[in-house]
Amino acid sequence: MSADTSRFTLYHNPRCTKSRQTLALLQEKGIEPRIVRYLEEPPDERTLKDLVGKLGLERAHDLVRHKEKEYAEAGLSPDSDDETVIRAIARYPKLLERPVLVTGNRAALGRPPENVLPLLKD
């Protein structure tokens, strides 16, 4: 593949099966993305708002892992507004649904890993 691999960023959790599968898929395609281990380097609120936009999500809540205990700790519910959700993810990065591949002004959630493939076709 002739893609400029430096333009890809993967928000990655190496303990997550889908995240590892997505990284392996990218590597099979010759792409070595910049890895952001978001549990160690949590994205700030501005970055999270940017991710929601690049993913084309209607609501920030769509980027949250609802079954994590931090969801309740943060006081989140399906009715939580975007600002509340963004603040909660910034405070509890474990809430971020993963993996997320970003390139330019677009992003895709690697659930399933094949969801990221359209981003590679530039």
Image (spheres, grey):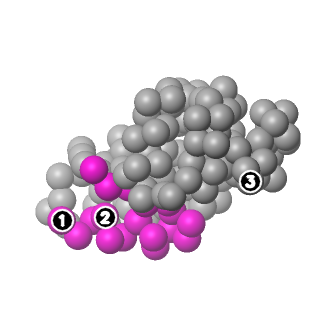
Amino acid at dot 3: Pro
Q: Residues within 10 Å of mark 2 (few under 14, many from 20)?
A: some
102 drawn magenta: no
Where residue 65 sits: x, y (%)?
Answer: 70, 51
Report x, y in % for residue 13: 59, 44
At a point 32% along the width and 55% down the height, the residue shown is: 106
Q: Residue 49: x percent and y percent?
A: 46, 39
Residue 36 lies, with reference to residue 16, above or below; the image says above
Left or right: residue 50 compared with residue 67: left
Point out the tag, 2 or 3, that comes first from the N-terminus.
3
Tell me if 103 is positioned left or right of 54 in this view. left
Quadrant housing residue 88 = top right
Which amino acid type is marked by label 2?
Leu
Label 3: few (<14), some (14–19) or many (≥20) C-alpha neighbours in 10 Å: few
Image x and y of residue 25, in percent: 43, 66
Circles 2, 1 touching at the beta carbon (< 8 Å): yes
Q: How far apart in space, not on screen, are marks 2 and 3 (Cα)? A: 29 Å
User: In the rendered image of this protein, does residue 87 appear above or below residue 32?
Assistant: above
Q: Is residue 77 above or below residue 3?
A: above
The residue range painted magenta reads 105-122
